[in-house]
Amino acid sequence: MKFEFKPTDNIKDFREYLSFFNRILSSVIIYKKAIYPIAILSVFYFATLSLSQFYDIFIYIVIITMVVILIYYLLFLLAFKVFKNKKNKVLKNTALFCDLESTFFFTIEDNYLIRENEFSTIKLHLSNIESIILLKNGLVLSIAKGNNSIFIPIAVLPVSLKEFISLIKDINPSLMVFEEFTRLKKLKKKTYISFALMLILTFVTSFFIGKYNFKRYDLILTSDLIKQNSTNFASGDNSSYIYENPTLGFSLALPGKWEGKVGIEEKSDRVNIYYLANGKQSHDTTLLFSVRGLDVFFNTIDFYIIKSEGLYLFVGPTKIGLKRGSKKLLEYQELYNDIKNIKLYRNTYHQG
């Protein structure tokens, strides 16, 4: 049995072999087992953190991401097809494969496989073939007791692939046959499934991180304050909540309609009143105003004076993070409009 092939005349087949050869290199295996998982986890981590900032418009982000992935995938397929057609026309020589331009001659006789070209001759007994690795367009004969291999395109075989394998198995019953192409096809399918699952996990994780990972304050709620009748508010509200701060020496009468909408944070030099969207702390918890003494420094870039009450200043933030036109912003502005009517009472035990 005799046959021959030239790599430059079987570019597609030989390129598949080179790709297989590169996959089994030690450096590639180390990369896949060590560096590759770390890279995947890093991308997952940073993607999750980035997406978590947009949890409130998550449905739109998911749709946009899917569309972008689809577009990139289609562009990749197009580019791959164009470059593949160009690459298949040329097979560059390398230091590793120095005989790509030569013709390989194969002879099988007397239970020996002989491969010859102008650079070398290999005479191999069929019993020394450890395994046959089937690629899509070729087969790789793996030689026992060594890392050497011989590639043969299926198209150049003078007999069918089944008959060729049977010929070797008759001499070497322990011969193992591995369907590498089928394995890669299954691996590709698993890779797509794993990518889809990781994408779903990224979205789900980032959504919950975005929704529940926010700064929480130690707040006093209106339910913790004393409620009493009041005539301090021109809005017609006939009740107020009394907040007292013995340390800073003042009391506040907050509008009764603020019930369940604000929380009070006590600091050593000031009191911060926060707007609570839907009555609980969230990403939308926003500073409404703070009360501090005249001698307490504050950044005029981030804060401005709303009004003064004797020795105290009502200070508001210059920027708020609520969305323009949202119901939460409208409610925030409604509360803000009541600040000018809030009464501050100076206590006699003020230590300042």
Image (cartoon, grey):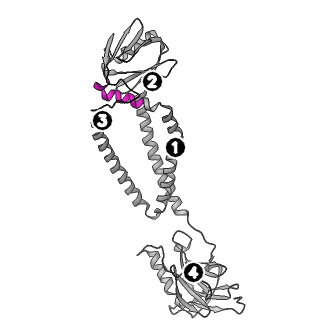
Which residue has dot 3 on it? 87
Tell me how far mark 1 sits from mark 4, CA to CA: 51 Å
Which residue has dot 1 on it? 37
Which amino acid type is shown beneath numbered disc 4?
Glu
Which residue has dot 2 on it? 178
Tell me how far mark 2 sits from mark 3, CA to CA: 28 Å
Residue 75 shown left or right of residue 342 in the figure: left
Which residue has dot 4 on it? 259
- Mark 4 crowdedness (10 Å alpha carbons): few <14, some 14-19, many ≥20: some
Q: Is residue 321 visible?
A: yes
Question: In the rendered structure, does residue 33 fall within the stretch colored magenta?
Answer: no
Which amino acid type is shown beneath numbered disc 3?
Lys
Eye-nearest disc, 2 or 4: 2
Q: Quadrant of the N terminus?
A: top left
Q: Which residues are magenta?
A: 7-20
* Residue occupying the point 51% across, 62% down: 210
Asked if marks 1 and 4 touch (Cβ < 8 Å), the reply is no
Eye-nearest disc, 2 or 3: 3
Question: In the rendered structure, does residue 13 fall within the stretch colored magenta?
Answer: yes
* Residue occupying the point 36% across, 23% down: 99
- Point out residue 196 in the picture as x, y percentages from the top left corner: 44, 46
- Point out residue 95 in the picture as x, y percentages from the top left corner: 40, 29
Q: For numbered disc 4, what is the local secondary structure?
A: loop
195 w.r.t. 324: above or below: above
Asked if marks 2 and 4 touch (Cβ < 8 Å), the reply is no
First in sequence, mark 1 or 3: give its number. 1
* Residue occupying the point 44% across, 40% down: 191
Tell me how far mark 1 sits from mark 3, CA to CA: 30 Å
